[in-house]
Amino acid sequence: MTRTTPFGLDRRRLILGAGLALGAAATGLGPARAQGSGNSGTRDTDTVRLGWGRGGLPLIARERGAFEKGLADQGITVKWVGPFPNHAPSLQAVVGGSADFGFWGSTTPALAAIIAGSPLVFTNYNVYSPRSTAIIVKKNSGIDSVKDLAGKKVAVNRSGLGEFLLVAALEKHGVDRKLVEFVYLNPPDASPAFGQGRVDAWSMWTPAVDIARDQYNAKNIFFEGTDLDFLIDYSSLVTLRDFATRNSALVRAVIDAYAREGQWISEHPVEAETIAQKEGKYGDAVRDHLAGLKRQNRFYEADDAAFLAGFQKAADWLADRAILPRRVRVADHSVRV
């Protein structure tokens, strides 16, 4: 049985925002390319509004200051919009006109929004490793494996990492999805629901899953980094197609600035996790665990053929399992500047 809540992807708002860039929504036969490249590209604004959340790349960029300084040297002022609990409201901000970029969130809700009619495009991709999304249960729950989830309630975020990881776990372990109740909650609502026992398990990403594991004496029963057979979801920098066309030089500058920030994070895991800890207000044990992962960031351009082939495989997988409503050609919504 599947139960929905008001916290899922707001399809109507995303479709409504499609009117912001209808003139540029048509797609070609291959990966789309905005006019211009680098400093020779287009730019009609000196201010960029960037979404951010309580973890990950934009948070570190926002707190350190080097990111803003680098863009200021190019005459670009940064305004931070957020924080967002997950990617769906970040996308709504872009479509609704209050932000120019999302917050490097999951590709899956972005694809759901695109399928729903929003003129969003991917401008860059990031794959961090090792991966650390997990399905957790309380140690005293009596649940010791994915098979034990039959008849249980599991909190997930709709069309995001939480939902697809649960679907993949159930499929891998031969559990019929109809036997598990998917409870659609955003992270701020899912955490207390899990802690209070209103759901039996939670499928969630870093750092919230690590905080909950420590706070609620929980354990993993499925871990993305070791139990998932192939990457299904990626981090992505999303904007409107029209914005990417009108501001290709600015988009390029933002991508390059994030790449520099990602390299710093890869080279300074302890310092990066200490910044994230301050924002997330969690204990040293969680910080040290995350720092010990020594995650590395690798960025991919929007027309990288090998990357897009893997992304297409993932998108098809999601559509075939009804996490996405239908198939979509990802290259048609991937803009290289």
Image (cartoon, rainbow, N blue to C red):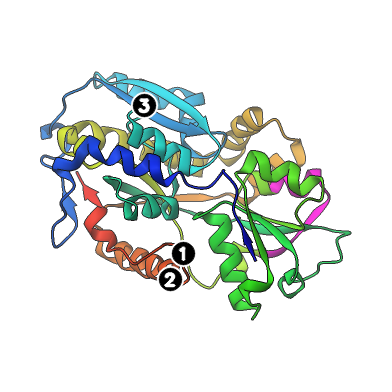
User: Could you tell me how many numbered marks the image carries?
Assistant: 3
Look at mark 2 in the image and give the residue it sits on.
317
Front: mark 3 or 1: 3
Image point 10% across, 41% down: which residue?
35
Look at mark 1 in the image and give the residue it sits on.
232
Image point 46% across, 34% down: which residue?
58
Q: How crowded is mark 2: few (under 14 residues within 10 Å), some or many (20 or more)?
A: some
Q: State how far apart marks 2 and 3 are (Cα).
A: 32 Å
Residue 24: percent from left, percent from top: 15, 43
Q: State how far apart marks 3 and 1 are (Cα).
A: 29 Å
Q: Name the residue type under label 3.
A: Ser
Look at mark 3 in the image and give the residue it sits on.
98
Q: Is residue 217 rendered magenta in the image?
A: yes
Which stretch did the figure color magenta?
Answer: 210-222
Q: How crowded is mark 1: few (under 14 residues within 10 Å), some or many (20 or more)?
A: many
Image point 38% across, 65% down: which residue?
315
Residue 34: percent from left, percent from top: 15, 44
Q: Do the residues labelled 2 and 1 touch (CB within 8 Å)?
A: yes
* Residue 311 left/right relative to 135: left
29 and 77: which one is in front?
Answer: 29
In the picture shown, does residue 8 fall above or below 271?
A: below
* Residue 148 left/right relative to 294: right
Residue 253: percent from left, percent from top: 26, 33
* Mark 3 or mark 1: whose residue is earlier in sequence: 3
Q: Residue 199 carries which label?
A: none
177 and 289: which one is in front?
Answer: 177
The quarter of the rendered structure image containing the C terminus is top left
* Residue 158 left/right relative to 216: left
* Residue 155 left/right relative to 100: right
The quarter of the rendered structure image containing the N terminus is bottom right
SS state under label 1: loop
* Mark 2 or mark 1: whose residue is earlier in sequence: 1
